[in-house]
Image (cartoon, helix red, strand yellow):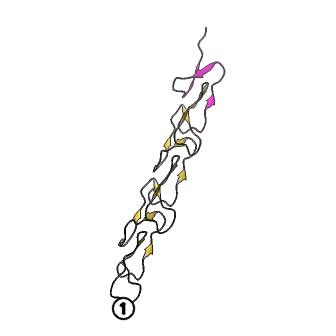
Amino acid sequence: KAASSSGLSGCTMCNPGKYSTAAAATCSSCTPGKYSDSPGTPNACTSCIGGKFSASSGQTSCAACGEGKYAHEESDRCFSCAAGFFSGPAAEECQNCVKGKFSGSEASECQDCDPGYYSGSDNSPFCTACPAGSVPSSDKSSCESCSAG
């Protein structure tokens, strides 16, 4: 609650998106990365949890990041997952693509390598063609030489 001028007989409750400290003359807006969803929030706003963000001051809620993006706690924006990583909606961090799979940036899932291609390391942004005389292993994480005959 805040009292905007001296001599008032009561205090005014701060609106959602704002807060006040004891004996405050005015309400303050929640900073980006924080929110207040109810009137009369005392002392401070609530931090957005990981996977959610608030981009501007005075927010009454936090928005979830979309697929292929992530946000840490108290974030004012979402960040894109790099190539070789992926995320579902409202992710706090991106997950790595395992051997035999790949992804471009902002991916919601990893893709299997195409026939004749492999990915020999985690976090791969692309797959590589197996050399002549070899084929991908069953999990597409390496190439195996063709046997004689």
Q: Is residue 149 above or below residue 3?
A: above
Mostly what secondary structure, the magenta segment? loop
Q: Which residue is mark 1?
A: 7
Where is residue 92? Give x, y as percent.
45, 51
For disc 1, the neighbor class at 10 Å (few under 14, some 14 to 19, many from 20) is: few
Q: Residue furthest right?
A: 132
Q: Nearer the viewer, residue 55 or 85?
A: 55
The residue under the point 43% across, 54% down is 50
Figure quadrant of the N terminus: bottom left
Q: Is residue 108 above or below residue 117?
A: below
The residue under the point 33% across, 88% down is 9
Q: Nearer the viewer, residue 3 or 48?
A: 3
Where is residue 96? Give x, y as percent.
50, 41
Where is residue 123? Give x, y as percent.
54, 39
Q: Residue furthest left?
A: 9
Q: Is residue 135 above or below residue 79?
A: above
First to last magenta residue range: 124-148
The residue under the point 61% across, 20% down is 134
